[in-house]
Image (cartoon, coloured by chain):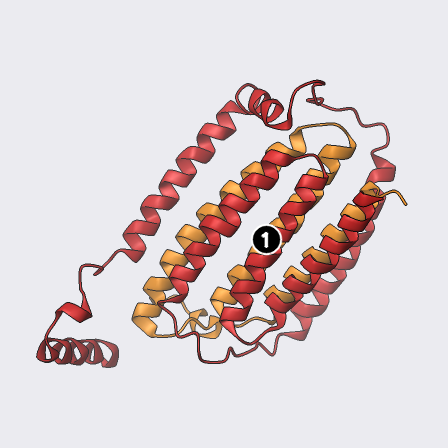
Amino acid sequence: MEIGLNHYLALSTILFSIGLIGVMRRKNLLMLFFATEILLNSVNIGFAAISHYYGDLTGQMFAFFVIAIAASEVAVGLGLLIVWHKRHNNIDLDNMSTMRG
Amino acid sequence: MFEAISFYLFAFLTIAMFFITVTTSQALYALTALAAGMIFISAFFFILDAEFLGAVQIVVYSGAVMALYAFGMMFFDTTRDLKEKHGNKLIVSGLSILVAILVVVIFSAPIVSDNITALYPAIDGVGNTQQIGMVLFTKYLIPFEVAAIMLLVAMVAGIVLAGKKMDLSLTMMSDADIKDLKEDQNKKVLS
């Protein structure tokens, strides 16, 4: 049985849906970041699969830049999260709906 | 044959790990399941002949990002169970419809793009890492430099945001000082 491009795209879609479920049902901001990582990774699988099946390196390049963006997102997001936690002693999303600081 | 076996094995493992990540009520389980899922994802990159991408995935995600999360979790109270959101029905249904459309688009994409040609075709006779280097440092040099600046900015932002009052060490202070500090903090929170 041959594994084609559609198999990888299906897997990518399933992982993306799992990440989206995580974004929808989580209240804790740290768990929301985890769900974001899942979303970015599922897209990376799709990029790598298309890059392989079309013999084109552009997909892998985009995957690299996605990884770089994910790394900087974690650094800044976690810094903001620590500041928020120091000030309010929780990281629930509901308490962040107002931007009074 | 081997490709099929490894694909299904790692697909099952990855989906299971990420499912645990989004459903568990323990932050530590979520972190470890996410780290395991990241490593399993790198297996797909190795199957797809993108060895360099797989190595970068292991180094950056399981190494740097997970270590950063584990470090960040030391600041938070992770023993307490996580509360779940009882979401807005409108947002949930809207996103579900969006996902359904997305699935259709993804599965029709290979049919639509049958006549696609490679922009930067893979070069024969050189390894994946060498190909990546050739393309990255010629065609994608400016995005590469911009990504470097972006990472620098993120690093500075992370240090500035998280590094405040890091010189304060509770283990080096006397009990009276700690008590004063706590009272100060309580006053700040109350005011």
Chain letter for red, please: B
Is B71 placed above or below B184 here? above
Where in the figure is residue B119, as x and y percent of width and height? 71, 23
Where in the figure is residue B115, as x and y percent of width and height? 85, 27
Tell me which corner region of the image, top left, top right, bottom left or bottom right, holds residue B53: top right
Q: Extreme front residue here? A: B2
Residue in front for this viewpoint, A9 or B40? B40
Left or right: B49 with respect to A84? right
Is B64 placed above or below B16 here? above
Q: Chain of mark 1?
A: B
Quadrant of the rendering where the N terminus of chain B is positioned: top right
The residue wearing badge 1 is B38
Where in the figure is residue A37, as x and y percent of width and height? 56, 55
Quadrant of the rendering where the C terminus of chain B is positioned: bottom left
Left or right: A68 with respect to B156? right
Residue at point 53% right, 63% down?
B32
- Dot 1, crowdedness within 10 Å: few (<14), some or many (≥20)? many
Chain letter for orange, please: A
Where in the figure is residue A16, as x and y percent of width and height? 68, 56
Is A20 placed above or below B121 here? below
Residue in front for this viewpoint, B89 or B104? B104
**Count of marks placed on residues:** 1
Residue in front for this viewpoint, B110 or B179? B179
Residue at point 59% right, 34% down?
B52
Query: Does any portion of residue B161 appear in the rendered image?
Result: yes
Left or right: B110 with respect to B129? right
The secondary element bearing badge 1 is classed as helix
Query: Does any portion of residue B105 appear in the rendered image?
Result: no
- The three-letter amino acid code for the residue at tag 1 is Met
